[in-house]
Image (tube, grey):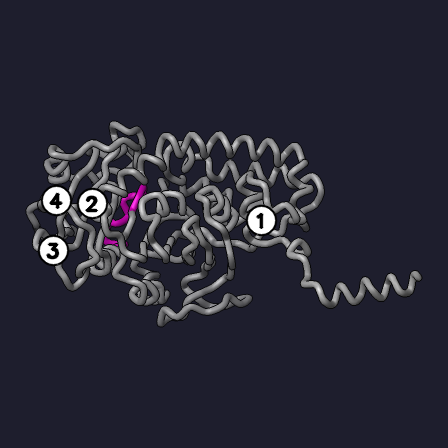
């Protein structure tokens, strides 16, 4: 009888497909890191009984609920009105792993490209973490998100140190959390890099590339397949021309571009090439005053609409005040959310720049009211703060 029972079990094992619970999926990992229960048959389910994870879940439930009420729901409502015909691709330079704001402003995009200096890291393997390390690791993930959850941006020097150490290092854990908390389902994840011609390649040990990244395939509530790229790459003039990154972007554009808390890098000459690329390859640029300076928008090609209040930049960014931008914002439309370094709602500024020539926008360009254009002059010589 015992032999017959064993034989029957073996036959069933051959006929029935392997259970998904035998492995931890990327989506289960993302949900677990986000303080959300994984699938019921996931090997991670027993770990949700850990008091450290339960405290982590309560903290994120509260933090993301407040963020949605204070910021993200208002941004989505604003975008519904003011970004009437968004592109399928969006670029977010100097972003770090900030998928939250990319998705809030451009939820209809099917391809997101984010870029910063921080490395993607490795895929989290929660089942191999030593006993007792779960709580500290989850605390580190939450700590690395503190400023973006509270004041809308990452602080570069803090993020660099937080994401370079610990068992859950790199940008992948943060991207996972933001995807899960944005209601997305992670399908596939792979490490990639770019060659000098902008061709995407699977990442390999010691691969030589100027752009190393992670590619995440996911779906939202609408069931559409979407792709998120995050690349660690040098966007300065001494790196971006040879990294292949701009050639990669060219294949995807024209796109909608988002810029937030970018340390005013686009104001200087060291980042002129990425600035010129964004102007030439964006159908829409949505930015705060740390983005492309007003003087680079040709009045014949761009329609400008200001929102919020323009105040002088913080003292740690000397020489970045724009008098003409101050004039433009005298007729700005109020906004109900904070954005950028001046993160308080009544101090934030947002500029919507829409390319008006048909060669870029065609019939798919966002609809706007009458253009508000600045006078043009000679050009002057990561969502984050230093």
User: Which residue is the site of mark 4?
Assistant: 369
Q: Is residue 272 visible?
A: no
The residue under the point 41% across, 56% down is 224
Tell which of 45 and 314 is nearer to you.
Answer: 45
Of circles 3 and 1, the one toward us is: 1
Please tell me whether residue 197 belongs to the stretch shown in magenta. Answer: no
Report which quarter residue 38 is drawn in: top right
Callout 1: SS: helix
User: Which residue is the site of mark 1?
Assistant: 28
Reply above or below: 241 against 219: below
Mark pair 3, 1: CA separation? 46 Å
Comes first in the chain, label 4 or label 1: 1
Callout 4: SS: loop
Identify the mark at residue 301; answer none if there is no mark.
3
Callout 3: SS: loop
* Residue range (magenta): 259-273
Report which quarter residue 324 is drawn in: top left
Name the spot of residue 84 as percent of width and height, x first. 23, 48
Few, some or many residues within 10 Å of mark 3 (<14, 14–19, 20+): some
């Amino acid at each position: 009888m015992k032999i017959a029972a064993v034989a029957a079990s073996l036959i069933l094992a051959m006929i029935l497909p392997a259970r998904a619970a035998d492995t931890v999926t990327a989506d289960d990992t993302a949900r677990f890191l986000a303080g959300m229960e994984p699938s019921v048959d996931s090997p991670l389910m027993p770990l949700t009984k850990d008091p450290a994870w339960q405290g982590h879940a309560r903290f994120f439930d509260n933090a993301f609920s407040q963020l949605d009420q204070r910021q993200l729901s208002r941004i989505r409502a604003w975008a519904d009105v003011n970004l009437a015909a968004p592109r399928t691709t969006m670029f977010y330079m100097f972003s770090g792993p900030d998928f939250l704001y990319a998705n809030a402003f451009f939820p209809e995009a099917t391809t997101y490209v984010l870029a910063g200096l921080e490395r993607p890291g490795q895929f989290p393997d929660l089942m191999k973490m030593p006993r007792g390390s779960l709580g500290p690791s989850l605390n580190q993930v939450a700590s690395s998100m503190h400023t973006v959850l509270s004041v809308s941006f990452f602080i570069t020097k803090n993020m660099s140190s937080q994401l370079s150490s610990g068992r859950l290092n790199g940008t992948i854990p943060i991207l996972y959390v933001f995807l899960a908390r944005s209601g997305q389902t992670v399908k596939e994840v792979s490490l990639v890099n770019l060659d000098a011609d902008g061709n995407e390649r699977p990442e390999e040990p010691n691969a030589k590339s100027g752009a190393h990244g992670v590619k995440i395939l996911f779906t939202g509530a609408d069931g559409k397949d979407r792709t998120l790229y995050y690349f660690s790459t040098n966007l300065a003039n001494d790196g971006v021309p040879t990294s292949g990154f701009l050639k990669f972007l060219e294949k995807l554009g024209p796109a909608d571009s988002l810029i937030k808390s970018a340390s005013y890098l686009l104001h200087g000459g060291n980042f002129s090439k990425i600035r010129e690329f964004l102007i030439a390859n964006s159908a829409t640029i949505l930015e705060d005053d740390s983005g492309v300076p007003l003087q680079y928008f040709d009045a014949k090609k761009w329609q400008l609409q200001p929102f919020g209040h323009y105040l002088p930049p913080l003292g740690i960014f000397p020489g970045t005040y724009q008098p003409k931008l101050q004039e433009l914002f005298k007729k700005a439309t109020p906004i109900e959310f904070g954005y950028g370094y001046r993160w308080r709602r009544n101090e934030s500024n947002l500029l919507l720049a829409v390319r008006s020539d048909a060669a870029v926008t065609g019939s798919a360009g966002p609809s706007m009211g009458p253009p508000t254009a600045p006078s043009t002059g000679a050009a002057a010589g990561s969502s984050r703060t230093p």
